[in-house]
Image (cartoon, rainbow, N blue to C red):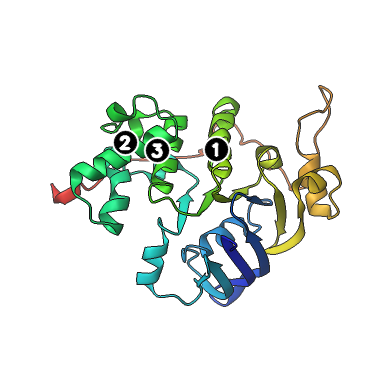
Amino acid sequence: MSAVVVEDLRVAFDGVEVVHGVSFRVEPGECVAIVGESGSGKSVTARALLGLSGGAVTGSIRVGGAEVVGAGERTLRGLRGAGIGFVPQDALLSLDPLRPIGREIGDAWRLHGRLPAAERARRAAAALTSVGMPEAAERMRDRAGELSGGLRQRALLASAIALDPPLLVADEPTTALDVTVQARVLELFAEQKARGRALLLVSHDLAVVAGLADRILVLADGRVVEDGPAAEVLRAPSSPEARALVAAVPAGRPRGTRLSSAGAEVLPPPVPGDVVLRASGLRTTFARPGGG
């Protein structure tokens, strides 16, 4: 059975449709990448699988044979984590800055299995170990801000796979990471794929998905403009949008080669003396768990 089957997916906000009839499926042990420029509908499509798009959704999304579109919140809560693991874009914003990562990962079993705290901690440490977190037992006490970008991403991945979901959705998981850390994070996803987990990878960067994806969907203005085996899309893209993305990949080009441009107008630099940003009396407050 396919891990997920999406048919004629449409998403609208305030009556304006932004995703237009998207269809695809992901099989166990397969990585499907959704790529496109910013605003193409990639993240909205991915979040619709979890009932988190924020818009009006029509069409069909079947996860493990169960219909997602039109499902109630109780059904969706059961799906998130157990049916689909989600790795959002920004680990620092996604993880609670005040809670140790061990407790945050342990929430998966608190919400779905109501296990005792000691057992939740044991399983959280095992999840961190499985994604290569060094000194996992000690790191359990760390908060997100105390971890490097790569370690935060490992913590997010550990949380996403805690309940062993058959499908993993990753939305721009390597954004803001340097290339060395990117490679390590992609290796972690490759390991999940090798274990038979289905992977839906969202990215604007073809270079990121090139070594991992089996199939690539190219989105533009909320529509699938190209869908095919990754090797074919990368070697001989047929749509203008896919050709533009391939042309923007710097790998393999002679030094000094000018990359293609999307053609967007570049704003002139600010005039010296202009105020770009001014803040006064800025305060940031986080509520402590338990209201303390």
Judge from the rendering whether residue 72 lies leftward or rightward of residue 138; answer left or right: right
Residue at x 68%, y 39% (from the top left corner): 268
How many marks are shown on the rendered structure?
A: 3
Residue at x 67%, y 67% (from the top left corner): 23
Are the two marked residues, 3 and 2, in contact with CB atoms closer than 8 angstroms?
Answer: no
Q: In which quarter of the image is residue 147?
A: top left
Mark 3: few/some/many CA within 10 Å (<14, 14-19, 20+): many
Alpha carbon separation for disc pair 2 and 1: 18 Å
Tell me if residue 147 comes above or below residue 44 in the rendering: above
Tell me if residue 112 comes above or below residue 60 in the rendering: above
Q: Where is residue 33 in the image (x, y as percent from the top left)?
A: 65, 50
Mark 1: few/some/many CA within 10 Å (<14, 14-19, 20+): few
Whether residue 281 is visible to the viewer of this picture, yes or no, is: no
Instruction: Provide the residue designation for mark 1.
Output: 191
Residue at x 43%, y 50% (from the top left corner): 164
Residue 155's tag is: 3
The residue sitting at the left extreme is: 292
Lower sequence index among marks 1 and 3: 3
Judge from the rendering whether residue 168 lies leftward or rightward of residue 231; answer left or right: left
Q: Nearer the viewer, residue 253 or 197?
A: 197
Whether residue 198 is visible to the viewer of this picture, yes or no, is: yes
Q: Which of 45 and 1 is in front in this view?
A: 1
Instruction: Provide the residue designation for mark 2.
Output: 125
